[in-house]
């Protein structure tokens, strides 16, 4: 798989109204019209190139949406005020009361809580399955199923979905495959592999500077327009509108996404290999012993690597917390729940980003309380970083002379 999204994003250029190399920012909530007829036509969605109200659309959001469509190779894309805003809009657009969803058992905690708890209010139910087991996925589909939902690389266990196989399975049941590609922009081109709808939390790698919250839906023009319908569009009526200033900022950061993703992946692969040599319990899709390594290799875009996330299991939540606190004191990264920042971020997902999942379910998934999720940063000298991390582990007795003690 080698969709040249990075080239397409670089070639997508908008100039400002005074010739600026960046597009002008539309810092307005509402727009004027020369005639009432044009306003009416715009409200009805029948006028190209006109804007009515920024909850409907704005030039800045349109530019970012077009860049996201180029990223995934879809006809269109909408942008939202958060990743959860994007996910919620898609699910509520596709599902009605009494409908059913088949979802990966390991997903972001917020998505899990939405599917497992909140949607009960609307009598929408979800069956959680091992998304890497196609038989389980197939058996979970019922006549009421309206989508198969998964993450390309799952949060936090880093399981890899076989998107072409899932696409084939979904199409045979005439239901859409919805893929959250937040962990692997550029590395995996989910729409090119068969996903019908691709969602992103732009907050993470795509923006890359941890200074905003945003989301996106990449899909067909028909579906994106349905989300913006003034009568029954979930994106429109839920009001999860992205601010124009943030849209413009994210668009500028996307210009360097290809450089950043390569470096995140390069550093993560180096650390994963070194940690494995030390005998640590490390999970990373780029390691040959990862259970989905073959699947990831087959569907990734090779120049962008296996992603910037890895996990280490250090045995207990107490040890995990002690190690993260020590690494933070040594300025090796920050104890924070997000990802995609220039600096390494680490957290214990069992007590943070996956805490919405009950403890007994975490244990059934294999989510240890001692698991640390690392979002590897853009360190220039990754060997120096590794040696310092290793020193922290030796200090705490996580490893000694290459042997794990926990």
Image: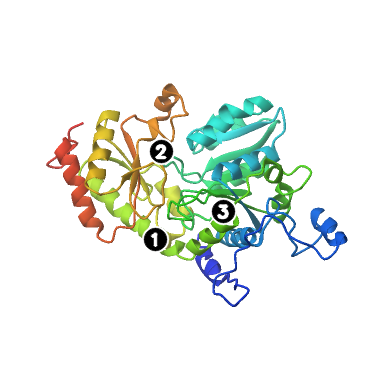
397 or 30, which is in the foreground? 30
The crowd level at tag 2 (other Cα within 10 Å; few <14, some 14-19, many 20+) is many
The crowd level at tag 1 (other Cα within 10 Å; few <14, some 14-19, many 20+) is many
Mark drawn on residue 157: 2
Q: Does dot 3 land on a helix, a strand or a loop?
A: loop
Mark drawn on residue 246: none
Mark 3 and mark 1: Cα distance apart in space: 21 Å
Along the horizontal axis of the image, is 116 left or right of 395? right
**Quadrant of the image containing the C terminus:** top left
Colouring of the image:
rainbow
Across and down, in percent, residue 132 comes to 49, 39
52 or 68, which is in the foreground? 52
The crowd level at tag 3 (other Cα within 10 Å; few <14, some 14-19, many 20+) is some
Hey, which residue is sitting farthest right in the picture? 37
Along the horizontal axis of the image, is 229 left or right of 352? right
Along the horizontal axis of the image, is 256 left or right of 391? right
Hey, which residue is sitting farthest top in the picture? 360
Q: Does dot 1 land on a helix, a strand or a loop?
A: helix
Across and down, in percent, residue 225 comes to 73, 52
Tell me: residue 193, above or below residue 336. Answer: below
Across and down, in percent, residue 57 comes to 69, 55
Mark drawn on residue 262: 1
Q: Is residue 316 visible?
A: no
Residue at image coords 24%, 60%: 381
Mark 2 and mark 1: Cα distance apart in space: 21 Å
Give residue 276's quadrant in the image.
top left
301 or 184, which is in the foreground? 184
Label 2 vs 1, first from the N-terminus: 2
Total of numbered circles in the picture? 3
Mark 3 sits on what residue?
A: 193
Mark 2 and mark 3: Cα distance apart in space: 22 Å
């Amino acid at each position: 798989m080698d969709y040249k999204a990075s080239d397409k994003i670089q070639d997508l250029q908008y100039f400002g109204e005074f010739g600026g190399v960046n597009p002008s920012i539309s810092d307005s909530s509402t727009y004027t019209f020369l005639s009432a007829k044009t306003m009416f036509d715009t409200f009805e969605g029948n006028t190209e190139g006109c804007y009515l109200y920024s909850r409907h659309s704005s030039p800045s959001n349109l530019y970012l949406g077009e860049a996201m469509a180029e990223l995934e190779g879809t006809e269109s894309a909408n942008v939202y005020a958060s990743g959860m805003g994007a996910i919620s809009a898609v699910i509520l657009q596709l599902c009605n009361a009494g409908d059913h969803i088949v979802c990966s058992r390991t997903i972001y905690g917020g998505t899990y809580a939405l599917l497992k708890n909140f949607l009960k209010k609307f009598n929408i139910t979800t069956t959680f399955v091992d998304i890497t087991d196609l038989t389980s996925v197939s058996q979970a589909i019922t006549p009421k199923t309206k989508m198969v939902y998964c993450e390309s690389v799952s949060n936090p266990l880093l399981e890899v979905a076989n998107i072409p196989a899932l696409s084939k399975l979904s199409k045979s049941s005439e239901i859409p495959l919805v893929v959250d590609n937040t962990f692997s922009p550029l590395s995996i081109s989910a729409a090119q592999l068969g996903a019908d709808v691709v969602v992103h939390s732009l907050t993470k790698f795509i923006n890359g500077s941890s200074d905003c919250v945003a989301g996106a839906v990449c899909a067909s023009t028909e579906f994106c327009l349905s989300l913006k319908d003034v009568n029954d569009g979930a994106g429109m009526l839920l009001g999860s509108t992205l601010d124009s200033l943030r849209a413009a900022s994210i668009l500028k950061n996307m210009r360097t996404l290809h450089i950043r993703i390569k470096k995140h992946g390069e550093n993560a692969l180096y650390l994963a290999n070194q940690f494995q040599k030390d005998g640590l319990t490390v999970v990373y899709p780029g390691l040959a012993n990862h259970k989905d390594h073959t699947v990831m290799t087959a569907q990734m875009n090779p120049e962008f690597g296996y992603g910037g996330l890895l996990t280490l299991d250090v045995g207990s939540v107490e040890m995990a917390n002690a190690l993260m606190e020590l690494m933070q004191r040594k300025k090796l990264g920050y104890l924070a729940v997000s990802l995609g920042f220039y600096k390494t971020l680490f957290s214990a997902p069992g007590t943070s980003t996956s805490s919405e999942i009950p403890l007994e379910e975490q244990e059934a998934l294999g989510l240890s309380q001692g698991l640390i999720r690392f979002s590897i940063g853009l360190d220039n000298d990754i060997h120096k970083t590794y040696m310092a991390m290793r020193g922290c582990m030796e200090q705490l007795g996580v490893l000694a002379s290459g042997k794990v003690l926990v």
